[in-house]
Amino acid sequence: MSLVTTSWGPNRLDIFTPGNDGNIWHTSWDPVMWQGWEGEWDSLGGPPGGYTGELSAVSWGPNRLDLFTIGKDQHVWHNSWDGGNWEAAWDDRGAPAAGIVSGLSAVSYGVNRLDVFAGGSDGHIWHTSWYGDGWQDEWDDRGAPPGPYFGDVSAVSWGFDRLDVFSLGEGGIYHNAWDGNRWQDVWDDRIPGLFIADWSVVSRGPNLLDIFGRDIDGNVWHTSGDGNAWQDWDNRGGPPLNPPALIGDIPCLSWGPNRLDVFGLGNDGHIWHTSWDPEVWQGWQGAWDDRGMPAGGAFDDLSAVSWGANRLDVFCLGDDGNVWHTAWDGNEWLGWDNQGAPPGGVGA
């Protein structure tokens, strides 16, 4: 994904995107420093030799941001905000012998801890970590799901020293996990029995994992695991539109225990939403609600983030090439506001 959003604390938002000029750009919401939105985009440069456009951002604590990208040299590159400054130069986190080509996903399970996963040209998932005092010496091979690897990797953490990693393999989605002592021996399949065009994962509490996948008809399917077993896949449907109803990313997030919010880009250019709170899906049979659209309609790169209980912020790239934003403030949805774009526009 090229439009990446994250939050390091209450009432704080950060947006990152590649620019058409080859730089990575950033803007933020900070009610103390900016009294709102920053008002302009600042350039973070990029790795020497350029990058592929794939980004992953994570925060392990207040006023801390870590940003990763894949360079054209097939290495993973890293930059960070320490509360006062961004690093002057990007640091090279290297790569396995096969090189890193896709599926970049960074996660933190605790203070001063980072774990980075990405797909190599050999079809395996590779992993490196920052453990507080330094980076591990070499990338470790996490193997691969059966069959061809399709390039997507997603990592989440539901607690200290716990990591869950998902990837697309032959037939569908596969899962591996670190339980605090070891990695599980094999990838277990979470195959839904139908083709998944887009997917995302989230944790809504200790030992709870949820996967959402969009099929080619624009319906969203869901399964969840509680540490003992995985549920059968259930069809969460989609907006009342002609198929395919949903056509793009389906980000999901959780702002509190046993709470889920799922968003999708409709074929009408609107953003659609459904939620679980905390025992049932919203509305009659889990109906989707229309969150409207930016002026001209939504185009791509749907992203959602939460900075606190009962708060949701949603971003997308509009048809006009600008980044647009809407939010749930705990009582109502706000209108769409235009966050503009880097000089030269948003890149791929």
Image (cartoon, grey):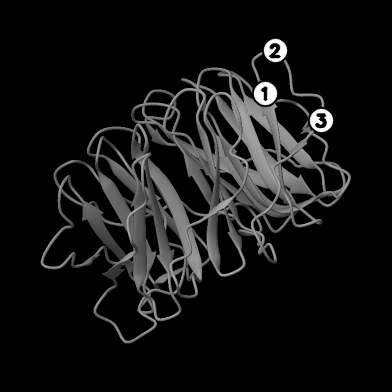
**SS of the residue under disc 2:** loop
Residue 287: horizontal and vertical position, in percent? 18, 67
In the rendering, which numbered label is found on residue 130? 1
Tell whether 73 sits left or right of 14. Answer: right
Residue at the extreme bottom of the image, as rendered: 242
Report the residue marked by disc 3.
138
Observer-nearest of 340 and 240? 240
Vertical comparison of 287 with 182: above or below: below
Label pair 2/1, CB-CB below 8 angstroms? no
**SS of the residue under disc 3:** loop
At horizontal 33% and vertical 70% (from top left) the residue drawn is 270
At horizontal 34% and vertical 63% (from top left) the residue drawn is 233
Vertical comparison of 270 with 177: above or below: below
Q: CA distance from mark 3 to mark 1?
A: 11 Å
Q: Can residue 301 be seen?
A: no
Q: Can residue 79 be seen?
A: yes
Q: Earlier in the sequence, mark 3 or mark 1?
A: 1
Report the residue marked by disc 2.
133
Q: CA distance from mark 2 to mark 1?
A: 7 Å
Residue 30: horizontal and vertical position, in percent? 41, 30
Specify the amino acid type for callout 3.
Answer: Glu
**SS of the residue under disc 1:** strand
Query: Closer to the camera: disc 3 or disc 1?
Result: 3
Tell whether 266 sits left or right of 107. Answer: left
Residue at the extreme left of the image, as rendered: 284
Q: Earlier in the sequence, mark 2 or mark 3?
A: 2
Label pair 2/3, CB-CB below 8 angstroms? no
Residue 95: horizontal and vertical position, in percent? 82, 40
Specify the amino acid type for callout 2.
Answer: Asp
- CA neighbours of label 1 inside 10 A, class few (<14), some (14 to 19), many (20+): some
The quadrant the C terminus occupies is: bottom right
Q: CA distance from mark 2 to mark 3?
A: 15 Å
